[in-house]
Image: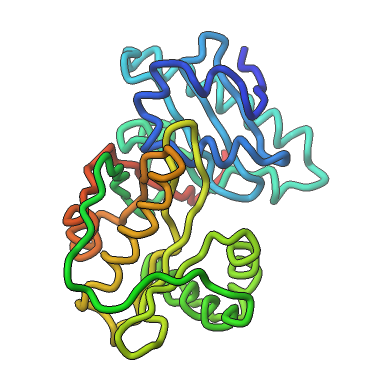
Amino acid sequence: MLQPFEPEDEVLSQESFSRDEAAFNLIHTISASSDSWRLKSPDGRMIFAQTPGRSGWLWLDPELAEQEMLARMQELKNALMTRATLQEAAPTSFELPGISAKPHIARLFSDLYAGVGCWTSSMTMEAYHCPIVNPPRGVKGGMQRVEATERLLAAEFLAGMVRDVYGKPADGQGQLTVADNLIRDGRLFFWIGDTGDPSAMAGIGGTSPRHGRINAVYTPPDRRRRGYCSALVAEVAGLLVERGLIPMLYADCVNPDSNKVYRSIGFQPAGKIEDIKFDRQP
């Protein structure tokens, strides 16, 4: 039977999961939230974490045979369906709209949970980690922490990122809360280009025992291909290195430009994650 676990549970520091820590950084971030739903198998070879209303993240020990994986996935499906039955008063927040996992695992679970042909692949991401940062040379400008007075511009940059990455309509007003939280915590940065204006943005997301995640990366279209993004990401990566962490980030596999930028400053592939959305609930 699957068991709930606490944010600092030893299952998150076991050797087999630690080998996948960079790719599954978000499991640490989700698990740290008090309202997340966290489950593990008794032997620790399956971990599931979900923020209410969001896709769940699923890790399975890669050394398990496929039939063993399927057996654990069936246990997870049963637990999810039991949860939905017990929480009928708030069905939306207790639904599982999708799953994020290694591509093979994500597809196996989606077939089992939603049914063959009843899901859609939303995005495949490459997780990158950066053992040694290789900053670009000759980029004009410098990094500056985003101030509260710049919240509107930061929110507009975040909306641009949402439109670029997820292909969804977004405006600055809808991103103000995210911008305010990042600015309040001192985790959001601009690159001030040679014109004296903010020309790129990047932030620091969640951390795990050995890794720190870079997120909120965006460059306005008219300021791209000038090195601003690579210079800023390298600077933010340096901040994480100073804290004793290995920088990591996720990049959409269909965007060759961003993948090229990250590789050029020292980021190395650490595993693919596929995000799948379910077309129906079981």
Task: Give the residue at the far right of this rendering.
Answer: 89
Q: Percent position (x, y) of residue 204?
A: 48, 55
Task: Give the residue at the far bottom of this rendering.
Answer: 195
Q: Nearer the viewer, residue 82 or 155?
A: 155
Residue depicted at 53% across the width and 40% down the height? 56
User: To which quarter of the image does residue 144 belong?
Assistant: bottom left
Q: Percent position (x, y) of residue 242?
A: 41, 45
Q: Nearer the viewer, residue 83 or 213?
A: 213
User: To which quarter of the image does residue 103 belong?
Assistant: top left
Residue depicted at 51% across the width and 65% down the height? 188
Q: Nearer the viewer, residue 70 or 38?
A: 38
Q: Is residue 78 left or right of residue 103?
A: right
Q: Percent position (x, y) of residue 26?
A: 49, 41
Q: Percent position (x, y) of residue 119?
A: 42, 47
Any part of residue 128 in sight: yes
Residue depicted at 24% across the width and 48% down the height? 267
Any part of residue 118 in sight: no
Image quadrant occupied by the C terminus: top right
